Structure formats: C-alpha cells, structure tokens
Image (cartoon, rainbow, N blue to C red):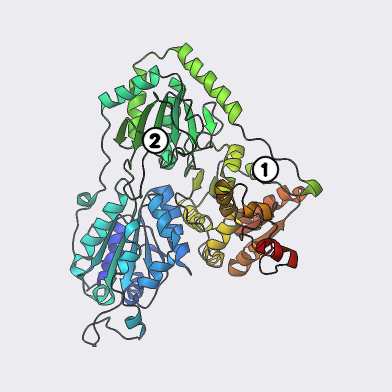
C-alpha cells in the first residue's frame, strides 16, 4: 500500500487510509471525547476526495460490533469497530464474546484518555471526564476474548500496528483484535510510508498430506456406521459441496449440532438432523469437522471401539476453559482442503456399492427414529411454534439470508426448514443474545440483493437494543424482516432449571421469574426508532398473510417487525403478585 498525499496527516488519517488498502469496507462506530482526531480525519479525507471506509454510526455499541460480525461472517474479511475508551468498550458487552466464540475477524479500535495536562500537546486533557475515564488497564476489559491486543504508542507505527492487527484477525482460526491509543497519539503527525501488502498476508492453516488423507479414507471405507458431526464447516460455502461429494460416495450420516452456518443440505438423504447426541453411541467411526461441542458427555458416549477423528481450524480450543472430547487422531487444518484431498483419494478407488447401500439403510432407519413429532394444534386458532416454522418456510427463496437467534426453537425450526443452499443460514456462534437483529445489518451490507430475515426470540430482541438497530437500518438502507417468537418470557433458563430440578419447587409452582410484560408490543419499538412497519399476530388464520405483507414492505425498502404470539412459557406474573401466588411462593 502507498500514500500519495504530501500534506501532513495524523495517525488517525493514516489508520483510515490504511484500512481501505487492507480491505476494510466499513467502520461501525459510536464516537466519544477521545475521537476528535478521527472525526477531523473523516472530514479531511472526505474534503480531499480520498478513499476511506464507509462510516456506519451506531447509537449503541452492541449494534456496532454485531453488525460488523454479520458482515464478516459472510465475507470472512475483517471490518473495523471504533468505540469510546473504557465505557464504549464495556458497552460492546456480550458481542465481544460472540465474535470470539464465532471466530469472526474484526478490528476493534478504542481511544484512551489523554495523559498530558498542558496545552503544548494537541489532544491534551480539556474536560473533567478525561480524569474519570482514565483507567489503568483498559485492555483487560476484553483481553481474554481477543486474539491480540496492543496500544499504539507512536504515530510513526500506525501503519505497521494496523497491518499486524488485520493480519492476526484474518489468520486461521480467525478472531477479534483490540487496538488502543491515547488521544494525543491519534493527533500526532504520521509520516508517509509504503507497506508491502504481501508481507502482511494472513497465515495458512497446517496442511493435510496425501498419506493422512489416505488414512482417513481407509478408515471411512472400513466402517459400517460412519458419522460426521459439524457446526461451522459452512463458513466456506465450497466446503458444503465437498462434504456432499464425500458423503454420497461413501454413505455417511451427517448431524449438524447448533449450526452456525448451513453446513449440509437439510433435505439430503444422509442428513440425520440437528439433535445433539444423535447416533453417537451407535456409530463405529465418528469424524468431527469444525465443531466445538459434538455431544454432551453426561448424556452419551461413543462405543468402546469407535474410531474417533477430528479436523478443525481450531483443534485445541485454547481460548475455552476446560475442554476435552476423546479423539484418536486430529488435524489442525482447513476443512475444505481436507475434504478436497479425501475426495481426490476416493476418485482413485472403487467403493463397494453394497457397502455404501448398507450404510445408507442404517442412516434411513436412524432418520425415521430421530424425526421430531409434530406439535398438537392449539384451540381457538392460536399459533403453535410448528405453525410459525412452516409459515417461515414458505417465505424462503433463492435470495433469503436467514439469521437465527431463538435458542430453544433451534431443532424445531431447522427440522422444518431443512435449508439446503450454502450461505443462506447463519446463527450466533456464542451465547450473548441480541446478536441477530444487529448482525442482519452487516449481512445486508455484505449482500445488498439478499432478503434478510432475522428469526429471534423475544429475549433476543430486547437484548439487541432495538432502538439502536432500526435507527441504523433506516439510516443506511439495510431493511430486514424480523420475526419475534413471543412466548412472553425467556425459555432457556426454564429449560436449564428443569434439566437440573425436573420435579422441583419451580416446576411444581410454575415460578421461574422469566416472564415479560404481557402487554409488551415489541414491534412498536422498531417503528418508533426507525420507521419500521409493525405487526402483531396471534391467530393462525392471519399469520401467513401478515408475514407476506411484512416481506413486501422489506422488498420495498422498509424494515418490518412481526411480533408473533405463541403459547406463554409460564403463567407467573411479575410485579403484580396476587395473594394466592404469593402464598405459593412462600410455601
């Protein structure tokens, strides 16, 4: 990269120019008192007609990082998030966890309070807040989730520090990095410099030799009941096709657990579904490809003589705490490269048709046993979750990009939709709720011609700070159809409680402290904040028509939110406890 300007430029200006050269398209930001150098740099580059990333102003930092996440999960290219000192960093909240766990390349840049107190240095302390926001270890707020964190101490190093940040974020396994700099440093003059982009390229994952491919192929061909488990193989859409070739040639069962992407066609004959623990105790060979939690060890274990293999770009999961699953042989390698080499090996062999057919018969029998039962129809024409999933399926087309964030509805929705187009489905790789409606902004920026649908629970909608989300969507022209599954509470804590205390007092008295206001009108928040079309539906007879109207609004350029009321998860009323309820609680 090179800079053609001959006029003095600040470190902030150089960072913006370099960001463009390094492939960063967008800067998602919420600006503060530490950003005068950046605000002036935005204006300077704009006045001079020079290239810099497009600025997306976000009223809340949850929107900023989640939108960057949504863009990068599709493009696999890092975007930039610019936030305000310690308070802006803290306001990123659980979106930091999400970016780390989903291995999303993103460069987070935060200011530091100025240290100089006299006027000799540009950017010195000018406000009382520069004292109260001056923390001693700001980076530690997010350090354990970052691949790398660093403080820019000299404007002369702005080029190299940003280039290294992008390089680390982009290298496999990808992930977020955190850069900081004091206000004075961003204001310092930074000299013109040429950098060789090739010297800062992302590193490649370890290889997978022909001999190693041969070992794995031989094991697959010897097995009678082979099983592949994956969660995020589909981050590379080419891997989906490569996996399909392998599966069809050999005859292998595929299970997607908590999928972050569309990893394998849901309607394929060898796809056994999305239920964790499926066939783990029946398979004689299990191949884990790009998965963090393949099964729950307290629930199921592989057979004693089951052959266990693993291919993953992040083989040791060193950013997690305790983690272990039994594996005989593992490879830290790119799944697409491995699958390609295995398919090359298979093309040189004769796969016995009768053996392949025997494997497929086992898979077919297993599929029938693993099917989810249909939910019973509700009286009075009310909407069941199954009804909603079927109605959403009718909306899906070749342009659909579906972002999913309703954890306890995962299996039901995926079994119903059976998504089969690579790059059509995305879910949060972490557990920080509020991701979906904001990631939809980045997804739409990455694929402007797509029809973006976010399917979220009512808790996920609230945690996403919708007053920020729909302001950004309207301002920057990124309409989405949001479908809110409104069961009047947060089902996940109830599910967790029943797993530990299936016949406890909470179950006996229906007291979980997880319900939300029965009169809440979630869609109206989006309408007030960003002019979104607001719908609320509780009758099955009106559901399909309402969703069709909402999608028509999105196609016309306006976000739409449909608040879909399904059976409540608890009858407990918070804040308005009746005498009988109070007696039950105290009993």
Q: Classify residue 282 as left or right of residue 109.
A: right
Check the picture and name the quadrant holding the N terminus: bottom left
Task: Say which label, 1 or 2, has the lower sequence index.
Answer: 2
Relative vertical location of residue 476 with respect to residue 125 in this rendering, above or below: above
Left or right, 65 with reference to 140 = right
Location of the C terminus by quadrant is: bottom right
Name the element at disc 2. Answer: strand
10 Å crowding of disc 1: few (<14), some (14-19), many (20+): some
At 62% from the left edge and 48% from the top edge, which residue is drawn?
Answer: 503
Extreme residue toward the front, this view = 587
Asked where in the image residue 3 lies, by quadrant, the reply is: bottom left
Q: Which residue is mark 2?
A: 289
Residue situated in front as seen by the camera: 361 or 308: 308
> Which quadrant of the view contains residue 523?
bottom right
Q: Which residue is mark 1?
A: 386
- In the rendering, at what x and y percent does residue 426 appear? 49, 46
- Name the quadrant containing residue 213: top left
Mark 2: give few (<14), some (14-19) or many (20+) Cα within 10 Å.
many
Percent across and percent down for residue 559 are 60, 59
**Is residue 122 something that shows in the picture?**
yes
Residues under numbered marks 1 and 2 in contact, where contact means CB atoms less than 8 Å apart: no
Residue 549: percent from left, percent from top: 69, 53
**In-front residue for pair 294/252:** 294
Residue 305, above or below 229: above
Residue at x-position 34% and y-position 45%: 317
Image point (42%, 60%), residue name: 65
The answer to whether any part of residue 453 appears in the image is no
Q: Measured from the top left, where is residue 81 in percent x and y?
A: 38, 63
**Callout 1: helix, strand or loop?**
helix
For the image, the number of numbered tags is 2
């Amino acid at each position: 990269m090179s800079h053609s300007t001959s006029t003095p430029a600040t470190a902030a200006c150089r960072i913006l120019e370099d960001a463009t050269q390094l492939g960063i398209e967008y800067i998602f930001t919420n600006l503060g008192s530490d950003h005068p150098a950046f605000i002036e740099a935005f204006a300077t580059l704009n006045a001079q007609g020079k290239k810099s990333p497009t600025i997306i102003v976000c009223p809340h930092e949850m929107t900023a990082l989640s939108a960057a996440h949504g863009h990068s999960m599709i493009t696999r290219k890092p975007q930039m998030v610019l936030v305000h000192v310690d308070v802006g960093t803290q306001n990123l909240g659980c979106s930091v966890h999400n970016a780390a766990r989903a291995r999303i390349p993103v460069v987070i840049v935060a200011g530091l309070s100025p240290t100089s107190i006299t006027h000799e240095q540009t950017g010195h302390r000018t406000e009382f807040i520069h004292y109260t926001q001056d923390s001693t270890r700001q980076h530690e707020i997010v350090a354990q989730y970052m691949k790398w964190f660093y403080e820019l101490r000299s404007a002369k190093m702005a080029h190299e520090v940003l280039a290294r940040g992008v390089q680390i974020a982009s290298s496999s396994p990808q992930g977020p990095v955190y850069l900081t700099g004091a206000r004075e440093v961003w204001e310092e003059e930074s000299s013109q410099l040429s950098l060789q982009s090739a010297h800062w390229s992302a590193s490649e994952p370890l290889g997978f030799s022909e001999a190693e491919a041969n070992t794995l192929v031989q094991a697959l061909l010897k097995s009678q009941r082979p099983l592949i488990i994956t969660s995020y193989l589909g981050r590379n859409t080419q891997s989906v096709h490569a996996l399909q070739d392998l599966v069809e040639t050999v005859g292998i069962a595929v299970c997607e657990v908590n999928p972050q992407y569309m990893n394998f066609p849901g309607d394929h004959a060898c796809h056994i579904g999305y239920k964790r623990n499926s066939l783990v105790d029946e398979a004689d060979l299990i191949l884990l490809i790009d998965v963090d939690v393949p099964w729950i060890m307290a629930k199921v274990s592989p057979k004693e003589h089951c052959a266990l293999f693993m291919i993953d770009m992040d083989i040791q999961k060193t950013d997690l705490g305790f983690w272990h699953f039994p594996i005989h042989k593992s490879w830290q390698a790119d799944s697409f490269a491995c699958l390609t080499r295995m398919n090359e090996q298979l093309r040189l062999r004769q796969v016995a048709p009768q053996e392949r057919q025997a494997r497929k018969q086992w898979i077919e029998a297993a599929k029938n046993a693993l099917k989810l039962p249909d939910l019973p129809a509700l009286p009075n024409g009310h909407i069941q979750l199954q009804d909603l999933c079927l109605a959403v399926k009718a909306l899906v087309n070749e342009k659909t990009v579906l972002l999913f964030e309703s954890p306890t509805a995962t299996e039901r929705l995926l079994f119903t939709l059976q998504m089969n187009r690579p790059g059509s489905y995305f879910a949060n790789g972490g557990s920080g709720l509020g991701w979906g409606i904001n990631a939809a902004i980045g997804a739409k920026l990455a694929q402007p011609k797509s029809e973006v649908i976010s399917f979220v629970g009512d808790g996920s909608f609230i945690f996403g700070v919708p007053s920020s989300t729909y302001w950004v969507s309207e301002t920057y022209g990124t309409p989405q159809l949001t479908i809110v599954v409104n069961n009047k509470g947060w089902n996940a804590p109830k599910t967790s409680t029943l797993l530990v205390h299936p016949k406890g007092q909470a179950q006996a008295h229906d007291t979980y402290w997880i319900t939300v206001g029965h009169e809440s009108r979630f869609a109206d928040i989006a309408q007030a904040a960003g002019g979104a079309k607001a719908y609320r539906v509780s009758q099955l007879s009106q559901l399909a028509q309402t969703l069709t109207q909402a999608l028509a609004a999105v196609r016309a350029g306006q976000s739409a939110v449909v608040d879909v009321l399904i059976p409540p998860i608890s009858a407990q009323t918070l804040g308005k406890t009746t005498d009988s309820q109070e007696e039950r609680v105290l009993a």
